[in-house]
Image (cartoon, rainbow, N blue to C red):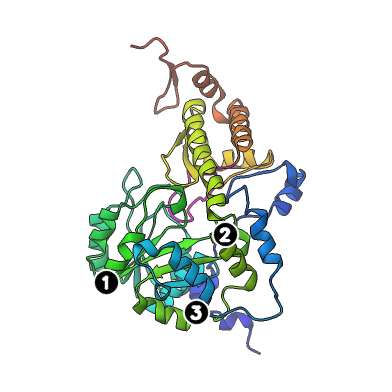
């Protein structure tokens, strides 16, 4: 008798994307109530969607199939981006922007794609699950894109898709439009993933009308507080949107998601107040991490999160110490690139930031973080770690 394993193709046998745990599972594993947790691991809008948006969802009739063309939603999105020359024919909607990325790969069917790690792990996951070669071009030391190296990789590997998020997840660095325009000269379809664009002042949306080989992806998960409903969209030339509309799952956007998306667009100004608050809190968190936690080096970010390099102790230890105290952040390891010595903290409410900082300071006083060095640094002493691990007090050095 044939076994089920026999029918599983080799490329998916070990294919997995590690998402985030539910709060209920976390609470059960550490013995704390859910309301005692601080969840800062998925870059969500912790303020959530306005009550008026959720009320619109409750009014919908859900026993009928949704509109397979998402006509109302696409029209509203075209209106939102109308100043950039976007029409309904330039918009495709999906179950989160991940759905859009998957549809792009199915339409283009590339033999190779280019990505720039560290970056969003979904690109590699989707490509490898489809048997597509993933060409990695490492980012510069400041996490910006090495444009010349990307151009060289596209040409060498004949890659026909390049995924570049802006701001990049998990580093928060943006792709300047000037860099995008250089890449758009290549025989390659450039997907600029702008999941976090509402938290910065840079967007490639204005380039879409002039470049047929460009798609900009957006999501309602981050700015709109609708991560649980899974709604995203792509904007591109009609000649790429038409086949995407043709091969996508017909009912990929459910009635609740479409209703929430339409309502979020109507109440966008109100929601953007919370986005502005998160941007400000991210800046405050960055400053406090930089000034108060000497063993972390925060990376400047234009998104709603801050990536931090960890010194003096393995980053997984910091993640676990925070975790067991109910402060939930993100540790990637090698998912999306070499981030084995980094942790990412999402922006939340001011009380969330204070809880994170207080907990980090508490952890910093523990012996497993080289207590003498950490405490001394936090109290204003100068410390040098020599290569052999010897500590030298340089407080009086000039």
Between circles 2 and 1, the one closer to the viewer is 2
Q: Nearer the viewer, residue 111 or 89?
A: 89
Q: Which element is circle 3 on?
A: loop
Q: Nearer the viewer, residue 231 or 112?
A: 231
Which residue is pictured at 63% across the width and 28% down the height? Answer: 362
The residue to which callout 3 is attached is 248
Task: Name the N-terminal-most of marks 1 and 3.
Answer: 1
Which residue is pictured at 23% across the width and 61% down the height? Answer: 152
The residue to which callout 1 is attached is 158
Residues packed near mark 2 inside 10 Å, few (<14), some (14 to 19) or many (20 plus): many
Q: Which element is circle 2 on?
A: helix
Between circles 2 and 3, the one closer to the viewer is 2
Between circles 1 and 3, the one closer to the viewer is 3
Q: Which element is circle 1 on?
A: loop
Q: How far, Cα to Cα, is label 2 from label 3?
A: 24 Å
Numbered mark located on residue 227 in the image:
none
Numbered mark located on residue 264 in the image:
2
What is the residue that sits farthest to the bottom in this orientation?
A: 1
**Magenta residues, start to end:** 330-348
Quadrant of the drawing holding the N terminus: bottom right
Magenta: main secondary structure: loop
Residues packed near mark 3 inside 10 Å, few (<14), some (14 to 19) or many (20 plus): many
Percent x, y for residue 88?
A: 43, 74
Q: In the picture provided, is 64 more to the left or to the right than 312? A: right
Q: How far, Cα to Cα, is label 1 from label 3?
A: 26 Å
Residue 43 seen from this side: no
Task: Name the N-terminal-most of marks 2 and 1.
Answer: 1
């Amino acid at each position: 008798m044939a076994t089920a394993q026999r029918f599983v193709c080799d490329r998916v046998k070990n294919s997995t994307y590690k998402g985030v745990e539910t709060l209920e599972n976390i609470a059960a594993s550490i013995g704390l109530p859910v309301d005692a947790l601080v969840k800062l691991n998925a870059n969500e809008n912790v303020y959530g969607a306005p009550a008026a948006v959720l009320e619109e969802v409750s009014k919908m009739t859900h026993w009928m199939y949704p509109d397979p063309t998402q006509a109302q939603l696409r029209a509203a999105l075209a209106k939102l981006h109308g100043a950039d020359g976007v029409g309904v024919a330039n918009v495709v909607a999906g179950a989160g922007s991940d759905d859009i990325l998957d549809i792009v790969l199915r339409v283009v069917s590339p033999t190779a794609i280019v990505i720039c790690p560290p970056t969003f792990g979904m690109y590699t996951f989707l490509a490898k699950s489809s048997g597509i070669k993933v060409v990695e071009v490492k980012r510069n030391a400041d996490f910006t894109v090495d444009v010349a190296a990307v151009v060289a990789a596209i040409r060498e590997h004949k890659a026909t898709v390049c995924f570049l998020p802006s701001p990049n997840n998990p580093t928060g660095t943006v792709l300047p439009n000037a860099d995008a325009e250089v890449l758009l000269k290549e025989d390659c379809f450039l997907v600029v993933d702008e999941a976090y664009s509402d938290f910065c002042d840079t967007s490639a949306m204005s380039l879409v009308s002039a470049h047929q080989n460009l798609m900009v992806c957006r999501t309602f998960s981050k700015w709109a507080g609708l991560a649980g409903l899974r709604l995203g969209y792509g904007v591109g030339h009609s000649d790429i949107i038409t086949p995407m509309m043709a091969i996508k799952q017909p009912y990929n956007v459910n009635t609740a998601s479409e209703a929430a998306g339409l309502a979020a667009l109507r109440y966008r100004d109100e929601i953007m107040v919370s986005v502005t608050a998160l941007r400000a809190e991210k800046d405050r968190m960055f400053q406090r991490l930089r000034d108060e936690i000497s063993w972390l080096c925060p990376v400047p970010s234009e998104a709603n999160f801050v990536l931090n390099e960890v010194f003096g102790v393995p980053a997984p230890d910091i993640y676990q110490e925070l975790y067991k105290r109910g402060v939930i952040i993100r540790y990637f390891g090698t998912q999306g690139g070499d981030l084995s010595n980094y942790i990412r903290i999402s922006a939340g409410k001011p009380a969330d930031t204070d809880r994170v900082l207080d907990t980090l300071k508490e952890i910093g006083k523990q012996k497993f973080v080289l207590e003498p060095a950490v405490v001394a640094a936090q109290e204003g002493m100068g410390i040098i770690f020599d290569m052999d691990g010897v500590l030298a007090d340089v407080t009086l050095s000039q």
